[in-house]
């Protein structure tokens, strides 16, 4: 038998009123207590949100959210979960975040 281990990846990031990211476990074992963060770099209030995903079973997806923030102009958004990181550019108009890949 091979070594069973969770493998976390950031599957997608979407904008709108706040940032939503989908975190997938593409490994062969359940992941527990997965730390995550969403950091927005730019002219942004409430620029960081973090937490812990209690469990992500193998093959399962979990959505994490930044919650409300407000800003103006270009932003760099970095999503991290369990060792995986994905960065995307965006533009904020008040509370609305438009993503630019």
Image (cartoon, grey):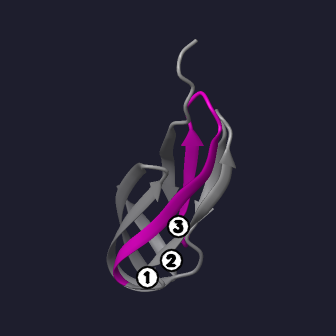
Tell me if residue 87 comes above or below residue 61 in the rendering: below
Q: Find the magenta span and give its range.
A: 16-43
Tell me if 25 is positioned left or right of 85 in this view.
Answer: right
Camera-nearest label, 3 or 2: 3
Quadrant showing the C terminus:
bottom left
Q: Earlier in the sequence, mark 3 or mark 2?
A: 3
Q: Which mark sits nearer the N-terminus, 1 or 3?
A: 3
Residue at image mark 3: 19
Q: Is residue 91 magenta?
A: no
For the point 54% across and 58% down, the residue is: 35
Answer above or below: position of 7 versus 40.
above
Residue depicted at x 49% and y 55% = 13
Residue 33 placed where, x, y %? 62, 54
Residue count near mark 2 (Cα–Cα under 10 Å), binned few <14, some 14–19, many ≥20: some
Q: Which residue is mark 2?
A: 96
**Label for residue 93?**
1
x%, y% of residue 61?
A: 64, 44
Mark 3: secondary structure = loop
Judged left or right of residue 84, residue 16 is right
């Amino acid at each position: 038998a091979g070594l069973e281990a969770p493998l976390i990846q950031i599957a997608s990031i979407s904008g709108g009123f706040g940032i939503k990211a989908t975190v997938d476990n593409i490994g062969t074992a359940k992941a527990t207590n997965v730390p995550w963060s969403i950091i927005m770099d730019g002219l942004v209030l409430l620029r960081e949100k973090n937490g812990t995903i209690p469990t992500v079973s193998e093959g399962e997806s979990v959505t994490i959210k930044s919650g409300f923030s407000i800003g103006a102009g270009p932003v760099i958004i970095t999503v991290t979960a369990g060792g995986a990181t994905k960065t995307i550019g965006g533009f904020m108009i008040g509370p609305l975040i438009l993503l630019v890949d």
